Amino acid sequence: MRNFSELSERELLALAISNEEEDGRIYADFAERLRGDYPASAKVFSEMALEESEHRRRLIDMHRERFGEHIPLIRRQDVRGFTARRPAWHAQPLSLDTVRQQAQLMELETSRFYRRAASRTSDASIRRLLGDLADAEVEHGNLADRLVEENLPASVRREEDEASRRMFVLRVIQPGLVGLMDGSVSTLAPVFAAAFASGQSWEAFVVGLAASIGAGISMGFAEALSDNGSLTGRGAPLVRGLICGLMTTLGGIGHTLPFLIANFWTAVTVAFVVVVIELGIISWIRWRYMEAPPFTATVQVAFGGALVFATGILIGSS
């Protein structure tokens, strides 16, 4: 890698050309990824990609005029301290907030880098070129603001933000909540049945651990195989299955860990407190994301949990 200050004017132009090309392709990727769910935002990034292409064309014309046809291959990763870009395919899932923030950061980072580099060089032509590139990046940011105003009025943005929230609920919250409810509620019976049947904390812990992991694997596979997401928009089945499986295991492990306490009744008391906390968290999630009335959500979850809890105690004590 070379230092930015060591680059010649020709190399700076070549770097600026590759920089504009990469940014344009990232914006085009954003547009393609957003087109199905957020057409207005996709139009914004398509126009920004075209603007980056126009800047690249002007830089190529300048290079051709001053240095000829051949443009040296020099990229960000070849220059020490230059800004890096995160490809669109790294973001899973790709949300509106993610792409808007990344676009703003891309323009800001490049502009600041050009200005800092300009302040460290004594060559007038390089300083002028870096200043021009920094101004161009500021113009990019102004263009982005104008495009958002033109294509994303407040009503459209609210609609897209609401659609983004619904997709987050559908792809993350829903499978996670299903897993948490299954893990927290369904494992209550075997854990407390084993505890009261044996009177030993360790036996209850082993049963709870097996039930939690087994339920996590089962729920993960069930969620992943239930829907490939192509029609319902629920997202990648592997991701959904992983979320559901992990939350199922977490829900069961929560009230299983207290049985590592050697004293049986202390372990039972702590486990009961954990169960109450788990059911409270489930009720809050249902109210916060699933729009269930607070009282209804609490009563439904508490009633179901109490039934399973009582079943486990009755079976274990019989």
Image (spheres, grey):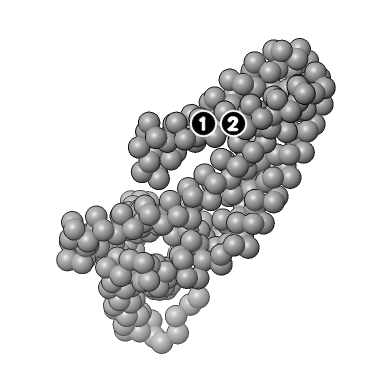
* Residue 167 position by quadrant: bottom left
Residue positioned 69% across, 51% down in the render? 218
Which secondary structure lies at badge 2? helix
The amino acid at mark 1 is: Phe
Residue positioned 78% across, 33% down in the render? 207
Q: How busy is the neighbourhood of tag 1: few (under 14 within 10 Å), some, or many (20 plus)?
A: few
The amino acid at mark 2 is: Leu
* Figure check: 180 above or below 266: below
Provide residue 281's location: percent of width, then percent of height. 49, 32
Which secondary structure lies at badge 1? helix
Q: Cβ–Cβ below 8 Å for labels 1 and 2? A: yes
Provide residue 16's location: percent of width, then percent of height. 38, 69
Residue nearer the viewer, 77 or 3:
77
Q: Which residue is mark 1?
A: 303
Provide residue 65's location: percent of width, then percent of height. 31, 84
Q: Is residue 125 left or right of residue 8?
A: left
* Figure check: 210 above or below 306: below
Give residue 307's mark: 2
